[in-house]
Amino acid sequence: MKKLLLAAGIVLISLSAQAQEKSQGLEGAWFATSQFGYQQSKSGDVKSTNVMVLPIVGTFVTPSVAVGAGVGYLNIKADNASVGGGTADLNSKLYVFQPLVRKYWNIAGNFYFFGQLATPIITGKEETSNLKISQFGADMSGGIDFFVTKNFSVEFSYNLINFSQTTLKPDGGEKTTITDFSIAHVANVESAYNSALYGSGGSLTTPFAFGFKFVF
C-alpha cells in the first residue's frame, strides 16, 4: 500500500510539474536567431539584388509574446540602373537596427504562426554617388515557426504592411524626404530600390526572410 501511495504521489507531482510548465510556456526564456533575406530580379540589362543579414536577440515576456532587437547589414545593388538620364552600377551598404515584438499562436504540434511588428532604423550610403541614406518605419509581418526540438526552430516570415520615411542627402546637395505606405512588399528589387532612393519611397528591407532560432 505504501508503495502504491508513493507511486501515485510521484505521478501527481510529475503531472503538476508538466501542467505548470505548459501554462508558463516559454515565458522568461531567451532566444537568439539570425534572419537572412535575399531577393534578385533582372529586367533587360538591369540586374538587381538585395541581401539582408539580421542577428536578433530577445526574450519571452509572456508564454506567447516575445520582445527583442536586431542589429544587422543590408546590401542593395542594381547593375546598369537608369539614373539621371544615364546608367550606373549602384551599390548601397546599409546598417539596420530593428526593435520588434512578436505574438505566437500554436497551429498544430510543433508548428507555430507568429505576427511581428518591427520598427527598423536604417542608415548608410550609396557608394557610387556618395548619397547618404537614412530610413525609419514600421513593418508588420507574418511568419511560420517550426520547432525541430524544444530549443531549436526554423522560421520563415514575409512583410505584409510597410510604412517608411526615407531621407536622401546627396553629396553637396539638398536632402529629400520620402514617405511611403504599402500593403505587401514590392516584389521587384529594381523597382523597390529605385523608388526608395530616387522616387516614391518604399521599404529597403527584404520582404522574405528565414532564420534558425535557438531558445535557452
Image (spheres, rainbow, N blue to C red):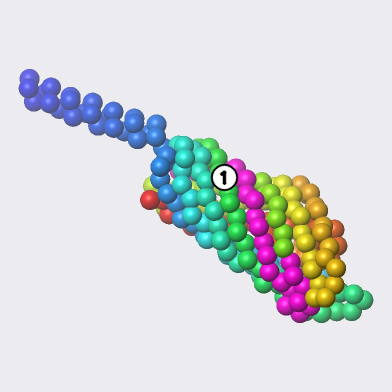
Whether residue 109 is visible here, answered yes or no, is no
Give the residue furthest to the left: 2
16 on left or right of 174: left
User: Which secondary structure, mark 1?
Assistant: strand
Residue 174, horizontal then vertical, whole percent: 85, 68
Q: Is residue 216 above or below residue 76?
A: above
Question: Residue at position x 68%, y 65% from top?
Answer: 123
Give the labeled residue for mark 1: 101
**Residue shown at the point (62%, 45%) measured from the top left:** 117
**Residue 116 belongs to magenta span:** yes
- Label 1: few (<14), some (14–19) or many (≥20) C-alpha neighbours in 10 Å: some
The quarter of the image holding the N terminus is: top left
**Which range is magenta?**
107-133
Residue 130 appearing in the image:
yes
Label 1 sits on what residue type?
Answer: Val
Residue in view at x 77 percent, y 73 percent: 131
Depth check, front residue: 64 or 123: 123
**Left or right of residue 84, residue 49 in this image:** left
Residue 87 is one of the magenta-drawn residues = no
Q: Where 86 sits versus 62, above or below?
A: below
Up the image or down, 137 lies above or below 52; here it is: above
Q: What type of secondary structure mainly makes up the magenta span?
A: strand
Q: Horizontal placement of 86 versus 182: left or right?
A: right
Vertical relation: 1 (above or below) 145: above
Query: x and y percent of residue 100 in the render?
Result: 58, 49
Residue under the image location 52 percent in, 50 percent down: 68
Q: Is residue 139 left or right of residue 18?
A: right
**Measured from the top left, where is residue 186 in percent x and y?**
76, 56
